[in-house]
Amino acid sequence: MADVKLLTVIREEVDASAALQSIHAVRADIAGVVEQKMVYPYYRFKAGCKVPTIIGKQDVVVDCLVDGINGLGATADPFSTNQLSVNYENVLKSELSNREAVKIAHRTVTHQLGKKLKMIAPFNVVLEAKGLLYRSFWIVRIGDSRIMVDSVTGSMHPVSASAA
């Protein structure tokens, strides 16, 4: 029996059946088959800072996620999580150290606040590490091709032969 891990996962909005229905809507001529469910790692941070305004400094809190494989950072809208038991072989491994993730999160939050507020200012960002978080997706085979279906948004992306 495969080893199982209990992970914190962004709550799924798309199950295997819905993933197949989405693909069927695009390619009704070929039946899709769910091959596996994978989970993708993200570092999660709660970022707090004081933003200068006309009436003084205002406290701002945002969530920031850092992709554990590609190192891309993004601020995130609020989301819910669940605990999910996942087979160890279906968990993609983070290739980023915590130290690197902190740097990326700090840069991302500072950049996003500057862009949103249209100002260059020292925001004094304070990061609170919230640990690793995962996002699940479905790998669906359609003929000789594979499609990745995001379990949160339902978006579809082709999987290259080298990744499959």
Image: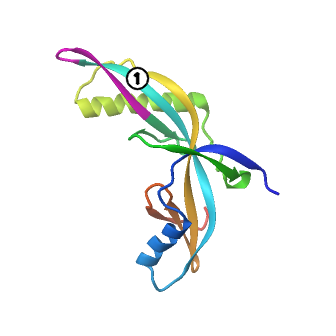
Q: Is residue 130 magenta?
A: no
State the scheme by which the image is colored.
rainbow
Q: 17 or 163: nearer the eye?
A: 17
Left or right: residue 74 versus residue 131 is left
Residue at 57% x, 80% y: name it: 143
Query: Is the N terminus in the top left, top right, bottom left or bottom right quadrant?
Result: bottom right
Q: Residue 59: say if magenta.
A: yes
Q: Position of residue 126 (x, y in %)?
A: 44, 20
Task: Read off the magenta span.
Answer: 53-63
Callout 1: helix, strand or loop?
strand
The furthest residue to the top: 56
> Residue flagged by tag 1: what amino acid is it?
Gly
Q: Is residue 75 left or right of residue 90?
A: left
Could you tell me residue 118's position as x and y percent? 22, 30
Return the residue at label 1: 48
In front of the other: 121 or 133: 133
- Identify the image quadrant of residue 57: top left
10 Å crowding of disc 1: few (<14), some (14-19), many (20+): some
Q: Specify whether 35 is left or right of 50.
A: right
